[in-house]
Amino acid sequence: MESLVIEGNHTLRGRVRVSGSKNVSLPLIAASLLTDEPVIIEDVPCLLDVCIMKEIVSEIGMGVGTEKHNLYLDASTVNRFTASHSLINQIRASILLLGPLLARFGRAKISAPGGCSIGSRPLDLHWKGLAAMGVKFTQRNGWVEARSNRLIGNHIYLDCPSVGATENIMMAATLAKGETIIENAALEPEVVELSGFLTAMGASISGAGTSIIRIKGVSSLKGARYRVIPDRIEAGTYMIVAAMVGGGVIIENVVLDHLKPLTAKLEEAGVQVVESKPGEVTVTPASFLQAVDIETMPYPGFPTDLQPPFSSLMTQAHGLGTIRETVFENRFRHVEGLTRMGADIRLNGQSLSITGNSNLWGNRVQATDLRGGAALVLAALAAEGKTEILEAHHLDRGYEDLELKINNLGGNVYRKRSRQEDYAQASASYA
């Protein structure tokens, strides 16, 4: 397993470009199953999750081609309705195949999907929504088989505004008979982008970005070409990096409207955030970083995915900051690593109390999930000495070219393989 070694206490300066959104790319790949015509998705990031999703759809028969950051997909050759458990188990986004496969072929089979262990993320909203459209589910030996002769539109109320459930139901409804209304739908930009992609394919959708989405089913969808928006979580992470260890960092390819809660909290802490021109943001650290309080919420509230990186920033602020996590109940696993590096953090249920102005020291810590790993990277950049972050593959799921981007800003980050991997590589060279 690879680890990431970071030499801290470097001031970062310069420009960094944000990659295309992971959480838009994944549902767009799934939605491409809804047509037998070619689809082109532009600015798809080269990430572990995206690679796994490509393997999954390739295994069920989809033609997949890649040229730089453009993805070419052809679902006319799909001939299977399930993929291997070893692939599905690696990413949670595999559940998004359910709606498109049911809409187009009337059947799908999926095992429990994987992803970060950040708390309970039940799939009951997916099942309930699709069942309301006429899907019959059979569970056997850890697999769920779903069938429907024809999906029928319905009025579906979500108990909570789940992004995944909203996306799955929306995709299924595009080819259903009649109208589907999703009430208490997720408001995230990723949902809006999926709606835009489906509309470009010929779907009839209104209300995306509001709590009520209406989808009128059509008989078929066509191919489309669509560009992925910038990744708001990657952009937010680099904004926090710039606030924590920057000396004036310009972040390119940013939709600042998607990051209003983060911008507000950074400015409250004394950080200067200026949109120098559309899509470009300059972040200047505070001369006196003030502790602030945050509470995670579904969009448009403060993103839960930026809570771990923001907690690293608060270790360097003056005063006492509190962080309340309301979205996932197990999203403080990075705290152990931060305290090993010298952070003064108290955990009380779903809240953190962080006494800032801590002197952080390099240590050997472990990334337990994607965003927790990002928090450790930020702490390592601010720490004295070297930090080794184990299980670096978690970061590869959501941050494209992480080492290259940080090093281009003046950091010192490199990969380190385990001795077992070095031995395996050496052995392979003699095979």
Image (cartoon, rainbow, N blue to C red):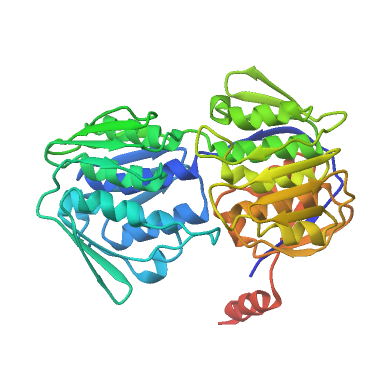
Check the image and name the residue furthest to the left: 149
Q: Please tell me which residue is depicted at 67% across the width and 38% down the height of the picture.
A: 294
| Residue 133 at least partly seen | yes
- Please provide percent x and percent y for residue 277: 62, 17
Q: Quadrant of residue 185?
A: top left
Q: Nearer the viewer, residue 9 or 129?
A: 129
Q: Nearer the viewer, residue 21 or 108?
A: 108
Check the image and name the residue furthest to the front: 348
- Please provide percent x and percent y for residue 69: 47, 42
Q: Quadrant of residue 396?
A: bottom right
- Position of the N terminus, as image quadrant, is bottom right
- Please provide percent x and percent y for residue 95: 35, 56
In the picture shown, does residue 47 fall above or below 180? below
| Residue 203 at least partly seen | no
Q: Please tell me which residue is depicted at 39% across the width and 33% down the height of the picture.
A: 193
Q: Please tell me which residue is depicted at 23% across the width and 33% down the height of the picture.
A: 215
Check the image and name the residue furthest to the top: 277
In the picture shown, does residue 32 fall above or below 278? below
In the picture shown, does residue 110 fall above or below 33? below
Q: Nearer the viewer, residue 416 or 275?
A: 275
- Position of the C terminus, as image quadrant, is bottom right
Q: Please tell me which residue is depicted at 54% across the width and 52% down the height of the picture.
A: 328
| Side of 426 where 386 appears, left or right | right
Q: How many marks?
A: 0
| Side of 17 where 362 appears, left or right | right
